[in-house]
Image: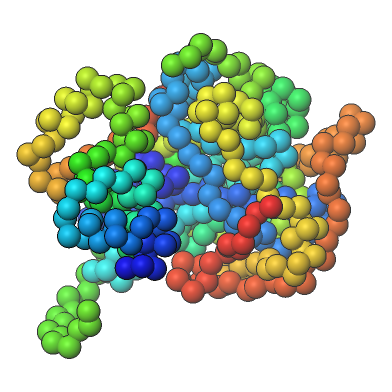
Amino acid sequence: MRQVAARVGIEPSYLSKIERGLPAPLSEGKIRALSLDLGENPDFFLALSGKVSSDIQEIIRKRPELFAELIREMRKMPDHAVLRLVREVRDGNW
Amino acid sequence: MIELRNDSLVCTFPGTVAHGTKLIISFMKTLRVPDDGRSYPLPPGLGLFPLEHVDDSRQVVPESWNEHGGVMLPMYQSEAMWIDFTSSYVDEHEVRYPFAVKVAAGKMNAITGEFWSNGISRDPQDYMVVPGQPWLDGYSVDKGFIRQFVAMPLGEGYSAEGQITGSEDVGGLQIAVYPMKKEAFEKRWPRKPPIIEKPLYLRGGSGTVTMLSVAEKGMGMAAGGRIRQEIYEDHFDLSEWDLNTSSRCFVHLANSQAWRAITGNHPSTKAPTAKQYSLHGLPWFDYYSDRKSLLGSDILNKLKSVIQFGKARRQNPLPENDSVDPGNIIRIDKPQSLDQVREWSGRSE
């Protein structure tokens, strides 16, 4: 635990708190560093902390209505249906 | 249907060919071989060019790009490229699915030098067959030789389009893909009985919008140095290709400045020169196949290379064009097997 804490740049006692599920807010950068160190998906760790990745926030902020509607539409869709969403390269007039 | 996935074009034909079959087309950064009259082995792949939908930048790309649709990628002036084709393996038939692929630059066919037409032709053959043709590095100028694709600004006359037609209105690359008909495929390679595996029990574990002008910012493909590369004859029957089920894509070439303006991203680093690369003893490649190859195009053989064209105008378009002696040449005969790749994965600068 000490080694992981040192690599991520937090106090071991703080990491211990996180491990025990006690309130210990971390910045997005530290969460990313921790997830990468542990070989986990950063988005998953961010979600556990009640956060959304800043790049995703930026995407939503650019077209908030569109993405809010899209996400609400997709909330009940099974994973395979979400993954099947494709975007075709548009062919025009040459 | 063509999708853009991981900086590659993924061509699929739902409902018409074997399930899950696809052709992946990628655009590889590479070093520019010297344009010195000598012939060189195949240069390495140095990573993929980034690709973006033209539609993602509708308000800032030239109007003609919106009209053409497709995708765009950034290239530096006099930067080289090769195109990689990978078709998917169909387990039930134990073979890769065949596709006919047609490539043009500035709407001039890269195999025949003729103006773009839809469909494919056998006389002369104006397309390649994948698998069998894993890469295309440039214009087919002679039997066993191509002249490398080298990006040059439109409007200066260097491109094949400019030299053949006298104008440079189109630029970019154009690609069309035709799958083999499903019936023809299944006739040639009947379905193999499924292998039933015995169970295994011991398994381990918004700012100001500025419209850009194509004349200022577009790029076209000129003919660079000579490379040893065969373009293979189609050994299938023409009637086996499904000409009603094509997918095609226009690939726009943005210079680095335009790419920054359009996407806000910096293009990736420049490839090393052939001299820098060879000095470190890094590998070049030769591809061997016993298939019959095409003769090359008389039209394309008459193209002036970038150096020849520049010299006629007292220009020096390729300042770093020193001849090299590639010593480390790797022979490839199974390009789509996992252990043989035409890439050098080191840093490109």
> As rendered, which of B82 and B119 lies closer to the eye?
B82
Name the residue: 12% across, 84% down: B199
Is A34 placed above or below B112 here? below
Seen in the image, is B224 located left or right of residue B71? right
Tell me: B304 left or right of B212.
right
Residue B98 seen = no
Q: Is residue B42 above or below residue A61?
A: below
Please provide percent x and percent y for residue B264: 52, 28
Q: Is residue A45 left or right of residue B296?
A: left
| B323 w.r.t. B330: above or below | above
In the current view of this chain or complex, which residue is farthest to the left? A76
Q: Is residue A82 visible?
A: yes
At horizontal 42% and vertical 37% (from top left) the residue drawn is B248
Residue lying furthest bottom in this view? B202
Residue B75 sits above or below residue B157 on the image: below
Q: Position of residue B182 (x, y in %)?
A: 26, 55
- Viewer-closest of A38 and B229: A38
Residue at the spot x=63%, y=32% of the render?
A: B256
Name the foreground residue: B25 vs A19: A19
In the image, farthest residue toward the front = A13
Residue B88 percent across, percent down from the top left: 35, 60
In the shown orientation, is residue B167 left or right of residue B316? Answer: left
